[in-house]
Amino acid sequence: MATVKPRRKTAPKTSKTAKAANATAAVDRPVKLGNPRMGWASDAIAEVTRKCNFKYMALVPGASYRGFHDSIVNYLGNDNPQMLICLHEEHSVAIADGYARVSDEPMAVAIHTNVGLLHASMAIFCAFEGRAPMVMFGANGPIDANIRRPWIDWIHTTKDHAGLIRNFVKWDDEPQSAQAAIESVLRGNQIARSQPRGPVYICLDAGLQEEALPRGVKIPDTDRYQPAPPPAATRATVRKAIAAIKKAKLPVMLLGRGDRSQAAWDNRVKLAEALGCAVLSNLRAGSMFPTEHPSHVLPPCVRPPQENKDMINSADLIFNLGWADLGGFLRLCTGNSQTQDPVDAEIINVSLQQYLHNGWNMDYQSLPAVDINVLADPDTFVQQMLDELGVKGKPTGKPRLKPAVKRIRHWTKGGAAKAKPRQAAPMLGQDFHLTMSNFVCGDPKISLCHISTGFPGTAARWSSPLDFSGNDSGGGVGAGPGQSVGCALAYRDKGQIPVTMLGDGDYSMGVNALWTASRMRIPLLVVVMNNRSYFNDEAHQHHVADVRGRAPENRWIGLRIDDPAPDVCKFAEAQGFQTEGPVKSGKDLAAALERGRKVVAGGGRYCIDAWIEPEDALERRRSDGGRGDQKK
């Protein structure tokens, strides 16, 4: 009888992405775990946190939540969630913010008592403005004064922790028993994930965390505590909107913030193709629609250039899906002195944002005049319209454009779209951005975490929902590095190579957030657009001096980051990055980017210091939106 030799078992090939994920998972592995039993109140809180499926928890450690910390490590094994240690509370929240922008999923965050919360508050504000879901665990006390340590426990006990941030979170709680804490986590997870999404804050009593778990405490099945489907519109409203768009001669679809999924992306494209609309996307919101698609007739923008204004003023219908500050945008387009009646076109406005407006901050923006007001989730409404129209399958790339839309010359045929970066030094802002565009948009494996100020819409050649995560919505200073690390983590988990563009001011304020990328083995390519100035303010100071008849030549005083210029590379090297620079020409930047790509594709981290000449302050002022210009 013939002998059959056993086949040699070969290990399956591991992708670079899986290797990078495994590298993160290998960090900070506990020892001597054994088979831990749930015995403390903080164990129960950790268990329900795991059941809510938070993959990561960003934190700066603190004694106020030492019981919870121990449960994450010695009860859960520092897995699901895995701790991402940070050097500042702002970075912890910013990382969760960036992660949510790419994944549409919340990360957990742990914040040390009132002092940590004060540190984190700016980043929480930015996350709220960006509608980023996250569940933040704070800590207080001990509430029982009898067990407080002298001095430190007293100053770190606050009667209303969440009062510091209540105006910019969706919900908060301070449970007083293990059973109440379990419900609080379930509720917080549900609220954070529900549209419109946002951060929630659960404050845990330090004394409660360290109490023995009462008998009979149960952790329920989280399947029964999931968020409801996003709010939808009535069928009558869907039909009314479809009829209005079909009747219009030049309908313009405005795309702002939306889900990052491929299905949501495809649905937007299918709807635009079916209705023949012109499409305009918001550059700050990230990649929401293929920008070179025939329907996307003009380049994406934040503040509208003249050609965008002309199209808006010619439109007889505006269909808004999540555009931030619709009223203000239309006012910029028309130049009208009042926001309430900015255009003659019929307006369909689809938004849930009024659910989060509370009057503390003016993030509700100007009040637009609308004809069909749809209180529904924009992506859900798009699906409803497709169902009503009977549109199925994949996008075709061949829309049935209305004649007026066809007559608009597509932006890719214009001179700005064909511009090429100069190769010689000195490098101007346009050279930097075009070089970055050629690098990022020419490779489907690269995803962009953040763009620097001045990035033109003609450089935004998006072809995938993962191409660009969108910029910070709160205007927070120093937020970019932390948010980029969070984006990079989510992009890494999706198999992408993460790249971020940061201004030198933003970078310098938050640079130690990059340490977490090194510590947790998160690949990231950082490119710093370095003009050695807080140049946005130079534009403002130029404007004020010009209006007042004073010397605009003095605009730089108190604003230049120079003499000496901070060493961008040494900052990054201190965080564990490989570096290069300063590079001072488009040619050298392109070569540096290729070297950086190889490092990051292999799981490493790389930072490039790109020196550019300061822009024209007058041009920056003109693109600022005209604050004060109406009075001039």
Image (spheres, rainbow, N blue to C red):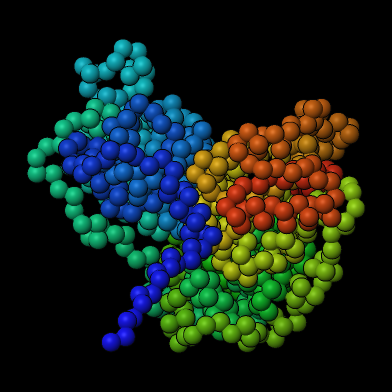
Residue 317 vertical placement versus 35 (above, below): below
Residue 71 located left or right of residue 618: left
Q: Residue at x 36, y 16 (%)?
A: 152
Toward the left, the furthest residue is 215
Residue 324 located left or right of residue 191: right
Q: Specify whether residue 32 is in view.
A: yes
Residue 284 located left or right of residue 541: left
Rendering coords of residue 170 (x, y %): 39, 47
Tell me how many marks there are: 0
Q: In terms of depth relative to the viewer, which is nearer, 355 or 507? A: 507
Q: Residue at x 71, y 38 (%)?
A: 569
Q: In terms of depth relative to the viewer, which is nearer, 401 or 532? A: 532
Toward the front, the furthest residue is 1
Residue 374 vertical placement versus 392 (above, below): above
Q: In terms of depth relative to the viewer, which is nearer, 164 or 224? A: 224
Residue 519 vertical placement versus 132 (above, below): above
Toward the top, the furthest residue is 150
Q: Residue at x 31, y 12 (%)?
A: 150
Rendering coords of residue 12 (x, y %): 44, 67
Residue 33 located left or right of residue 276: left
Q: Residue at x 32, y 38 (%)?
A: 31
Q: What quarter of the picture does the N terminus occupy?
A: bottom left
Rendering coords of residue 107 (x, y %): 41, 49
Q: What quarter of the picture does the C terminus occupy?
A: top right
Rendering coords of residue 276 (x, y %): 61, 82
Residue 389 vertical placement versus 268 (above, below): below
